[in-house]
Structures are given as structure tokens and as C-alpha cells.
Amino acid sequence: MSCREIIFSCILLVAMVARADPTQKTPPSPDQGSISPSGKFTPAYPANPSGSNVSLAQRDAEEAFKRISTLKQNGANTFQIGQVVFDQAKRTVTFPASICLRDQVIEYALVATHGKTYESLLSTEVSPMDIHLAMLLLNVSQTPVLGNFRKPAPVPGSNAVQIEISWKTNNEDVTLPLAKLVCLNNGKPNDPGQPMTLDQWLYNGSEFNPWGFAVLQEHSLIALIRDSTALVNNPGADRDNDQIHVPNAALLPAVGTPVEVVIRLAELPRPPITTPMPGMTPITPLSTNQFFKP
């Protein structure tokens, strides 16, 4: 992806913020949005004043360029934009978050602080724009969230990611796959359930709508339910049931504990090692090489 393409993508990452009530999980009012029969929340976007297309405001474009200007190199293969650090060699994206909920049904594994913190395991102050820009720089593009109802979603190899969560307990480092921190309880009250058995998550990269980059409107970063506006989706068949995901309290630290999120892409295949032909050396001209003598 060229620098021009990356800059153009960043310019598109602008939207109006739809704030959710962070204190309790209650049905939204009509002016806030609506919930579909499957439980998907859709914010009430403002009326479109100019028909099918809304021009991006100059101040939003300036903000996108401001985010680009924070990009800096801080190692041989590592770069940083805002609080997000990405490693081109290891193909990882790392950023801070904190424990948000431990004791209720959740629909998200991670949201930004302006998002649905009332139903998310983790929250972060990191901008979704910075996370997506880091993924673009690692050559990961957007892909749709597909699959039939209550069926697993297909996960292209280019968009398959592993996610790890790390924190300190008694000055010792703890690192666990995100899936182990979420249990499926089959909708039974007071049932702690069993940890998710998910090896790969789908980095779908949210989507664009007439108001801009959807993740900047809803601030949903890692969805446990089917949500094409989130950056990352759970591809499992359990994604169409919004009543069965609960925090794994047996493993989680206290609410408010700082954690580190690592999104890990598959390593790129290494080029094959070529073996020189017998009798040839890198500095011997072919005309004088013993291999070609009669």
C-alpha cells in the first residue's frame, strides 16, 4: 500500500461521535438509536443534509493529518502512532487498555472509552483510527463480516489475528489469549461457563457509511457478537447470541487493572533458500566457470 493510499484512508477515518450511556445497560431512546431483534445496536445517525453523500469537513481532514503526523519510528522495525506501537518484523500491534467489567453478560471484548463500556470486558483510551492505521501499514485491508446466522464466519488468512492480554499480578507478568478471558455459559443464570476455544479472530477493519468510518461513531473495537462496525469480530458460531458471553472472573484481575493488548498477525513466509549449482560461485563469470567447461 502506497503512502498516498494510506493518507487517503486516514482522511476517510472521520465521523460524528455517538456516545453511549456508560453506567447501565438499558434500551436506547429513539433519538439515540435502535436495537435489532438479534440485539445489534444501531445509533440514530443525524439527517443527511446533502442527499446520498456527505462531504467530509475540513476540520476532520485536518484531524486525520494530525494523527498521521504523530507517526514516528522508535526502533529498527517498530513504529508508534499515538499510544499504538506496531512491529513490522513481528507483525504485531500493541496498545494499553484496562479491565472494565467482570460480573455480567458482555457483548464486546474491547471498546474505546466513549463506546459501550457498560457491556465490554475491556476499555481503552486509544483512538480506533490509530489502531486501523497501524493495521493498514502492516498491509491488512478491510474485509466483510460474512457467514449465515449462527454459523462460523470465514476468516481470510490475510485477516486472521491472534489477540493476547497481559498484565502484572504481584509484580509477575501474566499473558493469556483473549479467548480464555471470556466464557460461554449457554445463557444459564449464575453459570460461570467454559472459556471460549477460539484460536483466530477476524480483523474486518469496520466499514464506511455516509457519515464516515463507522468505528469512530460506535467505538466498538473487538466484538463478541456479530458487528461489522467493529474493527475485530468473533468468527465463532456463538456470535449471534448476545446472552452467553461472560467475563472469566477466575482469571481476570480487578476492575481498573491496566493491561496490554497485542494483536498478532501471522508471520509472512520467508523466501526459500537457494543452493548454488555445483561448481558455481557468486564471483565467477559463467564463461570461465568450471561447470560450463567441456
Image: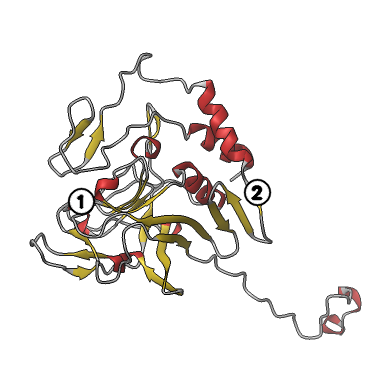
Q: Is residue 58 above or below residue 199?
A: above
Q: Distance between the residues labelled 1 and 2?
A: 42 Å
Farthest front residue in view:
170
Q: In terms of sequence position, does the residue under pointer 1 or pointer 2 come before the other?
A: 2
Q: What residue type is labelled 2?
A: Lys
Residue at screen point 16% across, 68% down? 193
**Left/right of residue 75 with respect to residue 231 in the rendered view:** right
Q: Which amino acid does label 1 sit on?
A: Asn
Question: As drawn, is 230 to the left or to the right of 240?
Answer: right
Task: Report which residue position mark 2 lands on.
Answer: 72
Q: Which quarter of the figure has residue 114? A: top left
Q: Mark 2 packing: few (<14 Cα in 10 Å), some, or many (20+)?
A: few
Query: Residue 169: which quarter of the image?
Result: bottom left
Q: At 62% from the left edge and 58% from the top edge, which residue is drawn? A: 78
Residue 112 drawn at (x, y percent): 38, 45
Tag nearer the camera, 1 or 2: 2
Q: Is mark 1 on a helix, strand or loop?
A: loop
Vertical placement of 29 versus 149: above or below?
A: above
Q: Mark 1 points at which residue?
A: 148
Q: Quadrant of the C terminus?
A: bottom right
251 relative position to 293: left or right: left
Residue at (25% x, 60% y) in the render: 102
Q: In this view, does 184 lie above or below 40?
A: below
Marker count (numbered): 2
Tell me residue 18's x, y (percent).
33, 32
The x, y position of residue 120, in whole percent, is 28, 51
Where's residue 98, x and y in %?
38, 56
